[in-house]
Every structure is written in structure tokens, then in C-alpha cells.
Image (cartoon, rainbow, N blue to C red):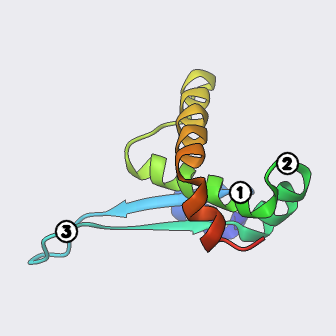
Amino acid sequence: MPDYKARAFGQRRQTDVIAQSYQPVPGAQAAAAEIIINAELAAAEGRRRRGGPARELALYLAHGLDHLAGGRDDTPARKQRMLQREEKWLAQTESLWAEVIAP
């Protein structure tokens, strides 16, 4: 993951998720995006946190989606707002992600 982050953002360091959006291809209707999730980190962190690896993986997905929707975590206050929003999303959708993402 550090190598991928270095290629994408010029910063070689570990990260939980990378979200990138792209302009639409000429002639296409919609833009494209990708979310790269560090599943190994999610498994390791999930073993230490409530909810386990499945919840941690869902949190990383929510974090990536939050970034694609314009969320920024470049200051402590913005990071806290993003986390609060993501925790709310996870609570509202637990029955969905808990069935899809196996521990």
C-alpha cells in the first residue's frame, strides 16, 4: 500500500484506504472512481477494535466513499467530522454490510 500511495499522491506511507475519482472518458456519461482498501490493515486493526475485521473493512469502505463525496480529513476537526459521519453510516447499514463482509 505505501508504494501505491506514493504513485498516487507522492507520499510513501502506510494508509487504510485510497479513493480517487476520474473525469469521464470523452463520450461517456459518468465519471469513474476507485477505492483501494488495505484489507491486511483492516484485519489487523479489526482484531483490536470492537466489531472485528468485518466492521473495520466496512469502515474503510465508508471512509473511501466519504472522500469521494468530498469529505476531507486534513485537519483534526475535519477528521473527527468524517469519522462521526462514517460511524453513523455504519450504524444505519449494519444489517447490510455485516452479511456481505465475512469476518
Label 2, label 3: how far apart the Cα atoms are: 37 Å
Q: In percent of the image, x 64 and y 52: which residue is there?
A: 59
- The residue wearing badge 1 is 55
Residue sitting at x 68%, y 69%: 3
Residue 79 percent location from the top left of the image: 59, 32
Q: Name the residue under label 2.
A: 49
**Disc 2, SS:** loop
Q: Do the residues labelled 3 and 1 touch (CB within 8 Å)?
A: no
Is the C-beta separation of discs 2 and 1 under 8 Å? yes
Q: Outermost residue, right direction?
A: 48
Q: Position of residue 42 (x, y in %)?
A: 76, 61
Between 23 and 50, the residue placed more toward the observer is 50
Q: Mark 3 points at which residue?
A: 30
Asked whether residue 7 appears in the rendered view, the answer is no
Amino acid type for the residue under numbered disc 3? Ala
Q: Nearer the viewer, residue 84 or 21?
A: 84
- Whichever of labels 2 and 1 marks the residue nearer the N terminus, that label is 2
- Secondary structure at badge 3 equals loop
Q: Does residue 61 appear in this view?
A: yes
Asked if 78 appears above or below 93 in the picture, the reply is: above
* Badge 3 or badge 1: first in the primary sequence: 3
What amino acid is at disc 1? Answer: Arg
